[in-house]
Amino acid sequence: MRKEIIPSIILGLITPVLVYYGITFAVTALGIVTVSLAGSASLHDMNNISRILARYTMTFQVIAAGISIIPLAFMMRRDRPKRRFYYEKKKHGLWYAAAAAMAAAASIGGNFLINLTSLTESSEAFQEAESSLFSGSVAVQIIGIGFVVPICEEMVYRGLIYQRMRQFMSVTLSVVMSAVFFGVMHGNIVQGIYAFALGLMLAYAYEKYGSLRAPVLCHISANCVSLLLMYGGVSVESRTAAMITGFAGVAAALAMIVLIDRHVQTKLIYPDDKQKKDKEA
């Protein structure tokens, strides 16, 4: 790889994140101004701003994610002619249900195992992030955490960042590096660990199914299960039972991975190789 193209590669990898978080910042700032003016409150009152953020952060994030989908879709479309390879267009039918089940099981396992540690209590950054995530109404959380945000994040981290990595990295390195990026961007150790593990699975799903629909479905499934665990009051009576439930969830997810690995295959198509063979023929 030539040294002169390294800066452009780095820029290409961080641009989707800059777009997403730039729009999120702009929507949040505009939302604070709008709510403050509507309530005739001072924008210089930090307590007022804190109250607005505590109440509307999730709402602002849902709006920002919805808006971000438009430029992200444009970026994905612009990337397509530049790709070194494409995924074979193939219908996987009910095997998408297996992907959703894999993600649901992983979510159950991850939630129970992380809650067994002291990380959730010792990490102030996680507590602040959790407070922000659950700041809106239940309907806003279901729409945002359950659907809009997963779609937007999959476009950023798998549709753009992972695919851009795959143009010059191996599958393994691309999967790991994109998962690390996904984990780090969550900003705290608890969500970072969970997001890293989830990121590995989401990139794997994208590679196996050859379509962004697979990781989107997995992400939605994982997030909806997390919401169900939160609001459904799902719990176990003892630490031992929680550990068994957590490892059972992980084991079920691994079993689904083995099943998917055996039955779901998507070929890579290299246009340049095909054109070369056509010329030689």
Image: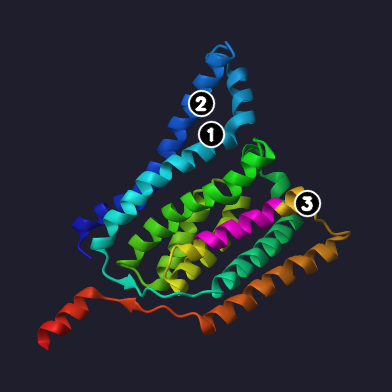
Regarding mark 1 in the picture, which secondary structure is present there? helix
At 45% across and 80% down in the image, what residue appears? 265
Range of magenta residues: 216-227
Residue on which disc 3 sits: 232
Which mark sits nearer the N-terminus, 3 or 1? 1
Residue 281's disc is none
Position of the C terminus by quadrant: bottom left
x, y percentage for residue 246? 74, 65
What is the C-alpha distance between the residues marked 2 and 3? Answer: 31 Å
**CB under 8 Å between discs 1 and 2:** yes
Residue 14: tell me if it is visible.
no
Relative to 276, does residue 107 appear above or below in the rendering? above
Residue 223: tell me if it is visible.
yes
x, y percentage for residue 144? 57, 44
At 37% across and 56% down in the image, what residue appears? 160
Residue type (three-letter) at the residue carrying disc 2: Gly
Residue on which disc 1 sits: 60
Callout 1: few (<14), some (14-19), or many (20+) C-alpha neighbours within 10 Å? many
Type of secondary structure dominating the magenta stretch = helix
At 65% across and 64% down in the image, what residue appears? 104
Residue on which disc 2 sits: 31
What is the C-alpha distance between the residues marked 1 and 2? Answer: 7 Å
Furthest toward the bottom, the residue is: 281
What is the C-alpha distance between the residues marked 3 and 1? Answer: 25 Å
User: Which scheme is used to colour this image of the protein?
Assistant: rainbow
